[in-house]
Image (cartoon, grey):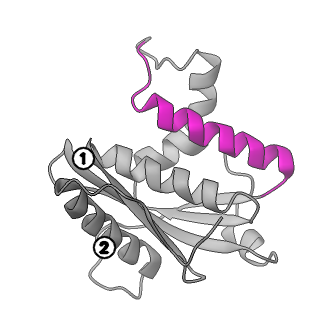
Amino acid sequence: MTLVRNHTDITSLPGAIVVGTDGSCITNPGPTGWAYVGDDGSSASGGFVQGTNNIGELTAVLEALRDFADRPLVIQADSAYTIGCTTTWAAGWARNGWKNSKKEVVANVEIVRAIYALMQARRDSGTPVHFQKVKAHLADVSVWPLNVAADELAGLASARAARGDVASRRSPAVG
């Protein structure tokens, strides 16, 4: 569910922020990193010793929603899976007891449920959010600079996770 159709509707609101999100996995599955980078200079990243790229992508969105719960938000993501889970499929899965069309438990259900709860809270409070699909792995940082920066941070976080360091890092402190 997106609460607005156009990201310019949000970016014109006081306190609005645009964040690029990304996940990274050294081997899939394997050491996993997640990150977001905001247009206000904020960033966050962390990792898991064992995970998947989808877990990293979803966690980046989850953390951005948590850290900017009271601010209008545009989330840029290069993962169609993550955007689909967050904006389209979760409502149906919730109605179906978090089962997919094959009657199996939804993949990454705990993260998806947490995102869904935050999206519902945003809807109820009237705090807008918009998801914007961006192209992944661009060499030209001028096209989607927040996503490129998030990709770099997520890669560093997955490398740290491979060494057992899964601590989250936030700069500057948010939330």
Which is more N-terminal, label 2 or label 1?
A: 1
Relative to 117, 108 lies left or right: left
Q: Quadrant of the N terminus?
A: top right
Q: Can residue 36 be seen?
A: no
Numbered mark located on residue 152 in the image: 2
Which secondary structure lies at badge 1? strand
Q: Which of marks 1 and 2 is in front?
A: 1
Give yes or no for contact between labels 1 and 2 (Cβ–Cβ under 8 Å).
no
Give the camera-side residue of 67 and 82: 67
Residue at 62% across / 60% down in the picture?
A: 67
Relative to 7, 64 lies left or right: left
Which segment did they paint magenta?
104-127
Give the camera-side residue of 149 and 164: 164
Q: Mark 1 points at which residue?
A: 49
Relative to 100, 88 lies left or right: right
- Image quadrant where residue 96 sits: top right
Whole-percent x, y for residue 113 in the image: 57, 33
Residue reaching furthest to the bottom? 142
Type of residue at label 1? Answer: Val
Type of residue at label 2? Answer: Glu
Relative to 6, 150 lies left or right: left
Which secondary structure lies at badge 2? helix
Whole-percent x, y for residue 126 in the image: 84, 53
Above/below status of 134 relative to 34: below
Q: Distance between the residues labelled 1 and 2?
A: 18 Å
